[in-house]
Image (cartoon, rainbow, N blue to C red):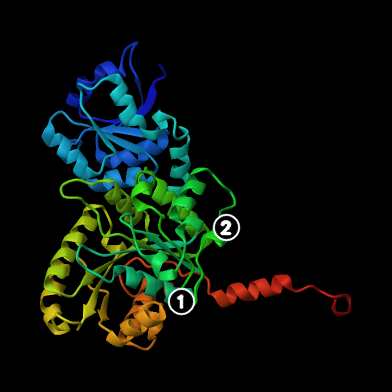
């Protein structure tokens, strides 16, 4: 039987419990590397070129952030649980599978190998995802995420993408693993091209991604180019939740478009565990260059939003990469801005953050958007909502001066569309003899 290459991230006690699977003539696992601390994990999996990690929940310094970053590299994670408490802890960390020391060799191989062990994928596929995930060239990715019970994150992503598309080559991608509604809103058929199709093309190593995207992106008046979600989210979830799929898909989009704005679903944890949908969303925010968290203005929405903020920080999203906006200020049932400021600024300060935008309620823009089918910012460009988003867009990107005004990471601004059109016009010009 061929041995499965793995990176071991086990404590000495856990390693002794499965030493019969690692050492000896009948061993089924081939250790390609070993780490004693979680901070060494990401570097080791890249150097070892192994598609799977086997780890202990009590590995020194291990957090959900380490697991999310390793999975974004296209590496599968299996956890070794010696009791029910360790099993629950591993599920909360977001591992792909959990095994126990008493499991059979076949169970270990199936858990650590995943779909590749069943013949669904080639063993080299995860390493292709690793190359995509660690290629920082190309455009910038902004992930927009809300929280439970807080409407407005998807609308914010759509409006931001529409405003950005007026300046730069931008694309809006729907990454809500629970199912979004952009296809219905745009009257599009996701079977003609979606995130799932792009993910499959990237995994297959298709070199004509630009040509495929030209056919798959939805183009509607008042909208940026849009890549809608999978036609059947439940059926596609197991495929999109594989390690590295979302990260490589985002990087593939960014290699074609200077700015990618991802509408990410809110679910980062399912109770005390992280299921497939949570792993999709976690990989998206970990891979993004910047993350915008949209909170609701009502009391219960703010409380849920702060919990979501803590989850993002626990995933290792640095404060320099985080932006926070409060949506629906002044709307029905929401307190005044002054009342919100008295409480909210202090809550953010405890987390070493500051509020980046107040998104005011604009009833006229909302009614016009529902009537015309465009985003709120486009429906009323001079309304308070559109003005707030325009200011936020300016803060997200580097200004003309080399030094930023604030101590926050800003995205590199894409080239203006007018510059690109001018270059294309110059390339099309042909020198005629009587002018040469």
Count of numbered labels shown in the rendering: 2
Kindly report which numbered mark, 2 or 1, lies closer to the viewer in this rendering.
Answer: 2
- Picture quadrant where residue 71 is located: top left
38 or 207, which is in the foreground? 207
302 or 314, which is in the foreground? 302
Position of residue 411 measured from the top left corner of the image (x, y, whole percent):
41, 66
279 or 118, which is in the foreground? 118
Position of residue 149 measured from the top left corner of the image (x, y, whole percent):
19, 66
Position of residue 275 measured from the top left corner of the image (x, y, whole percent):
25, 46
- Picture quadrant where residue 338 is located: bottom left
**Residue linked to disc 1:** 400
**Residue linked to disc 2:** 210
Q: Earlier in the sequence, mark 2 or mark 1?
A: 2
Separation of residues labelled 2 and 1 (CA atoms): 30 Å
Question: For the residue carrying disc 2, how many other residues have a C-alpha within 10 Å: few (<14), some (14-19), or many (20+)?
Answer: some
Question: For the residue carrying disc 1, how many other residues have a C-alpha within 10 Å: few (<14), some (14-19), or many (20+)?
Answer: few
Image position of 363 (left or right of 229): left
**Which labelled disc corresponds to residue 319?**
none
Dot 1 lies on which element? loop
Q: Residue furthest right?
A: 434
258 over 9 or under it: above or below: below
Position of residue 10 measured from the top left corner of the image (x, y, whole percent):
24, 30
Q: Which residue is drawn at 32% across and 12% down?
A: 24
405 over 4 or under it: above or below: below
Image position of 100 (left or right of 415): left
Q: Which residue is drawn at 24% across and 54% down?
A: 268
């Amino acid at each position: 039987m061929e041995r499965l290459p793995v990176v071991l991230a086990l404590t000495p006690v856990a390693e002794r419990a499965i030493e019969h699977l690692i050492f000896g003539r009948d061993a089924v696992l081939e250790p390609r590397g070993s780490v004693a601390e979680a901070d060494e994990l990401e570097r080791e999996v890249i150097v070892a070129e192994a598609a799977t990690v086997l780890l202990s929940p009590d590995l020194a310094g291990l957090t959900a952030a380490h697991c999310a970053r390793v999975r974004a590299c296209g590496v599968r994670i299996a956890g070794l649980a010696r009791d029910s408490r360790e099993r629950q802890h591993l599920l909360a960390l977001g591992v792909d599978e959990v095994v126990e020391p008493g499991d059979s060799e076949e169970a270990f191989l199936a858990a650590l190998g995943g779909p590749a062990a069943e013949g669904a994928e080639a063993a080299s596929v995860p390493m292709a995802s690793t190359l995509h995930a660690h290629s920082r060239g190309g455009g910038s990715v902004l992930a927009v995420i809300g929280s439970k019970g807080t409407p407005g994150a998807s609308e914010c992503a759509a409006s931001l993408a529409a405003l950005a598309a007026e300046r730069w080559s931008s694309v809006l991608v729907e990454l809500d693993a629970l199912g979004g509604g952009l296809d219905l809103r745009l009257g599009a058929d996701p079977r003609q091209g979606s995130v799932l199709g792009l993910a499959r093309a990237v995994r297959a190593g298709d070199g004509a991604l630009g040509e495929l995207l030209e056919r798959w992106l939805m183009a509607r008046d008042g909208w940026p180019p849009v890549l809608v979600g999978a036609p059947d989210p439940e059926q596609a979830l197991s495929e999109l939740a594989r390690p590295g799929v979302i990260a490589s898909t985002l990087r593939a989009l960014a290699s074609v478009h200077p700015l990618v704005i991802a509408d990410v679903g809110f679910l980062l944890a399912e109770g005390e565990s992280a299921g497939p949908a949570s792993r999709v969303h976690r990989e998206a925010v970990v891979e993004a260059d910047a993350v915008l968290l949209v909170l609701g203005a009502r009391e219960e929405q703010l409380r849920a939003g702060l919990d979501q903020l803590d989850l993002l920080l626990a995933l290792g999203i640095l404060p320099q990469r985080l932006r926070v906006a409060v949506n629906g200020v002044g709307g029905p049932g929401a307190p005044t801005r002054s009342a919100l400021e008295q409480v909210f600024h202090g809550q953010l300060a405890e987390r070493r953050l500051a509020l980046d935008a107040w998104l005011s309620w604009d009833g006229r823009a909302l009614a016009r958007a529902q009537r015309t089918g465009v985003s709120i910012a486009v429906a009323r460009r001079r309304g308070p909502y559109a003005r707030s988003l325009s200011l936020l867009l300016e803060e997200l990107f580097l200004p003309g001066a080399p030094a930023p005004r604030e101590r926050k990471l800003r995205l590199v601004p894409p080239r203006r569309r007018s510059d690109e059109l001018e270059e294309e016009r110059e390339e099309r010009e042909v020198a005629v003899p009587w002018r040469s």
